[in-house]
Amino acid sequence: MSAPSFKIEAPRSLATQVAQRLREAIVDGQFALGEMIPEEQLASSFGVSRTPVREALNQLQLLGLVAVKPQRGSYVFEATEADVEALCEFRMLIEPRAAELAFRHARTETIAEIQAAIAEMTAARKSKDGVRYSRADTRLHEAFVLHCGNSYLQAAYATAGAKIAALRTHLSAPADVLRPAGYEQHQQLLAHFSAGDFAAFDALMRVHVAGTRENYVASLKARRAAAA
């Protein structure tokens, strides 16, 4: 007779709950890049002490979303061209390999997830909702990693995933929802994935991410010019 299981579902800590909500706010563009995050105001808004807020900010610092500056406070990360370049190189390496593994391990589930993401993009384009489009874009690209079946690859992507999602919203979402090129490339990526044509998939992913990089860099330059 097997021993009974007494496992219970541990409730999420206050810090984890605050971190999740702040992560969503940063990714969705409710805080601007480089904006100070007021700890006291957040604590009051959440109805908690400043301790879980500080713990949450430390968690988000590990994801690259927040910079905690001693004696100065906490700030949303500020993107640089070098950072954009590094993240895009990372994506060009990780996403095509994750897609191959996802095709092998969970082809049907991945296709369904991508189709749902493209349906969301279609709706977002009709309503010209940049944030909704950005969320769907993130959902599509993360589908390959989600279903790849390799926990080490998933962990590697998780370290950068939140920042990648945030950059979509902050630097390109308003334009992406209006551009047909990126939308059409997502549909082509689905076609290549469904056919198992990973030479074509890899080539298109590189073009797609390179275009993203150029758009981000142009956006950063425009922001600097506006600030000057």
Image (cartoon, grey):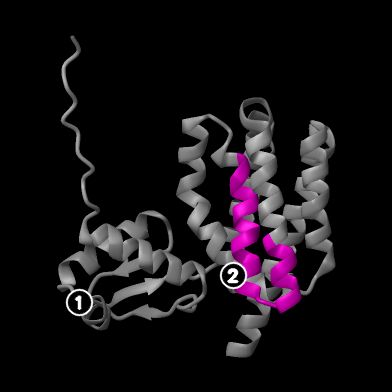
Q: Is 222 placed left or right of 73 in the picture?
A: right
Residue 171 is situated, as x and y percent measured from the top left of the image, at 62, 72
User: Mark 2 is on which residue type?
Assistant: Thr
Near-viewer residue (178 or 57): 178
Near-viewer residue (93 or 200): 200
Q: Does the stretch in magenta take in 141?
A: yes
The numbered mark at residue 47 is 1
Residue at point 19%, 33% (across, down): 7
Sequence-wise, the earlier of marks 2 and 1 is: 1
User: Mark 1 is on which residue type?
Assistant: Gly
Q: Residue 137's quadrant in the figure?
A: bottom right
Asked if one can make out residue 77 in the rendered structure from this viewpoint, the answer is no
Span highlighted in magenta in the image: 120-144
Residue at point 61%, 45% (across, down): 143
Residue 222 is situated, as x and y percent measured from the top left of the image, at 68, 81
Quadrant (top left/top right/bottom left/bottom right) for the N terminus: top left
Name the residue at the top extreme: 1
- Say which residue label 2 marks: 169
Mark 2 surroundings: few (<14), some (14-19) or many (≥20) residues within 10 A = many
Examine the residues drawn in magenta and state their main secondary structure. Answer: helix
Q: Is 11 placed left or right of 68 in the picture?
A: left
